[in-house]
Image: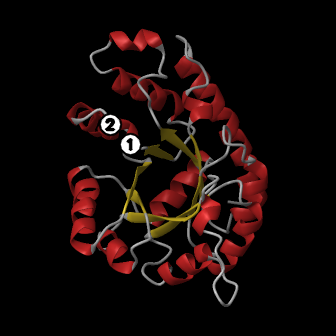
Amino acid sequence: MNKDDLVREIKQKQSFLCVGLDSDLTKIPKHLLSYDDPVLEFNKQIIDATKEYCVAYKPNIAFYECMGSKGWETLQKTLDYIPKNIFTIADAKRGDIGNTSAMYAKTFFENMSFDSITVSPYMGSDSVLPFLNYKNKWVILLALTSNEGSKDFQYIDDISKNKLYQNVIYKSSKWGNERNLMYVVGATQLNEIKKIRQIIPKNFLLIPGVGAQGGDLISVSKIAMNFECGILINCSRSIIYSSNGYDFAEKASFEAKKIQQKMSSLLLEKII
C-alpha cells in the first residue's frame, strides 16, 4: 500500500487507528479454546468487529512464532483475512547484516505480503536498506519507545547534546523518504514528539502506548499530526481484551468506535 492509499483510507474512515493483534492464547476468551485454531478465530472476530473503525492492523510476530509452525500458519491466515484496503504491519523488529535483512524482507514482503515491517536501526544502514528496496512497502524504524529501558540508550547525549534517538532519525531519514519510511515513537514521550516533528515533519509516525500503557490520545495527536494526518495510533490490549467473555467482539467494536469518533473530531480540526 502506498502513501496515497493510506491517506485516502484515513480520510474516508476518519480514523488513524491501528489495532494491535497481540493475540495471546492464555488471554483470549476460554470458550474459543474449543476451536481447532483458537487464536485465528479470535483474530477473525476482532477483525470483523473493528475493520469499520481502523485503517491498520499490527500483528506482533512474537505472539505467533512462539507457537512454532502452527503459529506461522495462524499468522498467514490472519493476514489473508484482513481486508485489502487496510494497512498491515508485521511487528517483527528485525534488523541484521545486509544479506540477512534481505531474507527477512523476502519473508514478510514477498512470502507473506505485509505492507510494512518494524525494523531496529542499531546495526545501521546496511541492515535497513534491503527492506527499502521494495516498491510500495514500508520500513517502520524504531526511534523512541515508551518502555522504561528506553532511558538506557535512547537518551544518551553526544558531544553536540543531540540524543541518540535524534541522531538515529537524522541519519536514517536520508535512507528513505516520507513514502516508505515511518518511525515508532511512544505516546508517553510528548515533549520529544515536538522535537521529532521538527526533524521529520512529513513522515508518518506509528505511535504505541495509548490506552493500557497510559498515553493520551488527544494530547499526542495534537502534537504529532501533520497536514496529511501523518500518524497511526496503535491500541492493542484496550481493544482486543476489553472483555474475556462471549461479548468480547462486541466490546472490541465498542472500544474501537469510541476511539474512531475521537479521531474524527481531531481530523476535522485539521480539516483532513
Measured as percent of width and height from the top left, residue 193 is found at 70, 66
Circle 1 residue: 62
Count neighbours of disc 1 (C-alpha within 10 A) and say few if under 14, some if 14 to 19, many if 20 or more.
some
The amino acid on which the numbered mark 1 sits, given as a three-letter code, is: Ala
Q: Is residue 249 visible?
A: yes
Q: Is residue 227 left or right of residue 110?
A: right
Which residue is situated farthest in the bottom direction here?
160
- Check if mark 1's residue and mark 2's residue have beta carbons within 8 Å: yes
Q: Residue at x 56, y 71 (%)?
A: 203
Q: Residue at x 57, y 26 (%)?
A: 241
Secondary structure under tag 2 reads loop
Q: Residue at x 60, y 50 (%)?
A: 208
Measured as percent of width and height from the top left, residue 221 is found at 72, 56
Q: Is residue 82 above or below residue 167?
A: above
Count of residue discs = 2
Count neighbours of disc 2 (C-alpha within 10 A) and say few if under 14, some if 14 to 19, many if 20 or more.
few
Q: Nearer the viewer, residue 228 or 125?
A: 125
Measured as percent of width and height from the top left, residue 189 is found at 71, 60
